[in-house]
Image: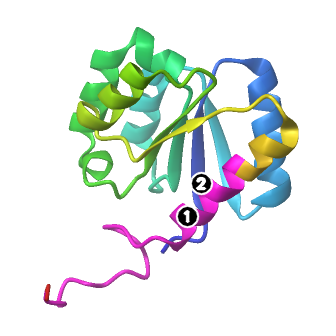
Amino acid sequence: MLKGGVIVLVEEDEDDIEIISRIICETFSHHELKIIPSLAEVFEYLSSATQRPFLIICDNNWRNKNQQKLASLIEKFPALKLKSIPFVFYSALPESELIDEAFKDLNVQGYFQKHSNYEEIRKDLSSIIDYWERVITPGSNEADYSHQKIN
């Protein structure tokens, strides 16, 4: 379980950035927020980051424009593939085809509908972040299950 760390927000919409930033800073001040406007910059950030990101939240508009880049990103960084760095979409337009592709082809860990109401956005982000703070993943600081047997 990781209680802190960098939340990476891949988002281009200034209004969404402002709202999400405010919610994370007010509610989850123990996390640093890194705003990245493009998938290319996510590559750069992950390549040079000295600290493992806690969570990547990505607007699906990037996915529509750059599906191959996103698939390549997940393949290039094993921590994304192993799901030890959770990657979730947060989309205003949850289309069933995109959701199916996200889970089948890209192995993302979540796909959430972005609401327009501030309180609903706060609830969404609280649910997402609370879950990933509690779950045990490969690479979690407190997770040492390497000697456990599967029953």
Kind of residue at disc 1: Tyr
Q: 32 or 130, which lies in front? A: 130
Left or right of 93? Residue 17 is right
Residue occupying the point 39% across, 47% down: 109
Q: Position of residue 100 (x, y in %)?
A: 33, 29
Kind of residue at disc 2: Ile
Left or right of 14? Residue 81 is left
Q: Give the number of the disc on residue 131.
A: 1
Element at badge 2?
Answer: helix
Residue occupying the point 53% across, 73% down: 134
Task: Answer above or below: position of 113 versus 64.
Answer: below
State which quadrant residue 48 falls in: top left
Residue occupying the point 43% across, 51% down: 86
Element at badge 1?
Answer: helix
Asked whether 146 falls inside the magenta stretch, the response is yes
Q: 49 or 76, which lies in front? A: 76
State which quadrant residue 8 falls in: top right
Left or right of 23? Residue 63 is left
Residue occupying the point 53% across, 25% down: 94
Magenta range is 124-149
Q: Position of residue 34 (x, y in %)?
A: 63, 40
Question: Does the CB distance between marks 1 and 2 fall below 8 Å?
Answer: yes
